[in-house]
Amino acid sequence: MKKFSLYIVLFASVSLAKISAQVNSNQLVANNIANSNAFLDASTNFDTSASSSNSIGKGLVFPDTNLALYRFDTTAADGITFPSYFDGMLVYNTGTGSTADPALTTQTTGLVRGWYYFSNPNGAANGNVTSGTWQPVGGNPKFNVTTAETSTNTLVNGGQVYAKKGTFTVSGTSTAPTTYSPAAITVPASGTASIYRVTVFKAGTGSVFANGVYSYDITNGNLITGSPSMSVVYPAGVYDYVVEYTK
């Protein structure tokens, strides 16, 4: 019986050590800032004149994660625990590619190593993480526009702008393309769907033929080449284009 009890004590001690080892501090953490705007103050108050080291207590080693593999566990998000449904959660991403979390409607493409936050402003109202997206922190992050739907770094009236890339072929005698590849780009059906911008160019040439087209049908993707003020017959050939839209 004593031997069995000892095993239990040792197992519990090892388990607690593994759990607590996830959080370490090089200074005493004191609970002495009650009723403050800040819930945690990790700044230093070392007096350099007293020979304190300038390298002690200066940095925060933040937990990292691979957002390409990350999956939300909303078990504890019950409106009381995590009432915002993780809106504003900050992570340091180490993965590349794109997110593939089945809990999210919109995935984040073009992941790079760095800081990301979870934007889920309607999480509390919706009671889920479904409409949230992982957004890079700061600056103008790069995004790779492909034939698949891509989230850009642009918002219009708070709405996300998406983009898709394709090509079309013209005959040189008509303002309408003869074929599209891989297919004409259509905008997902939505009561608020709208075209933000259509850009026509030729990859590898540095030439932009138009920052818009004369007309564009969001239901079938058919377009008429030209500027917003007049239709134009392009020289025969294959052209690249990007459609940006809200939904």
Image (cartoon, rainbow, N blue to C red):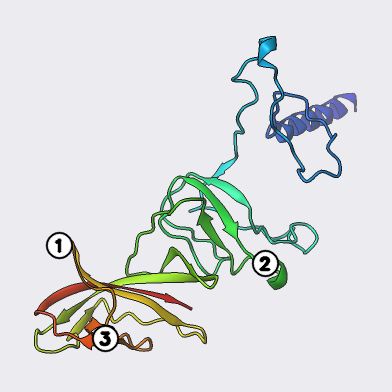
Q: Residues within 10 Å of mark 2 (few under 14, many from 20)?
A: many
Q: Please give the residue where the numbered disc 3 appears in the rendered image.
A: 229
Three-letter amino acid code of the residue under disc 2: Gly
In this view, the residue farthest toward the top is 51
Using the image, tell me which numbered label, if any, was put on residue 205.
1
Mark 2 element type: helix
Q: Which of 155 and 75 is in front in this view?
A: 155
Q: Please give the residue where the numbered disc 2 appears in the rendered image.
A: 123
Relative to 137, say whether 17 is above or below: above
Residue drawn 32% across and 70% down?
147
Q: Is residue 59 left or right of 243 when viewed as pictured?
A: right
Residue drawn 41% across and 76% down?
245
Relative to 124, say whether 98 is above or below: above
Q: How far apart are marks 1 and 2 (CA)?
A: 44 Å
Q: Find residue 140 and report its horizontal and vertical position in percent.
A: 43, 54
Three-letter amino acid code of the residue under disc 1: Thr
Closer to the chain start, of discs 3 and 1, is: 1
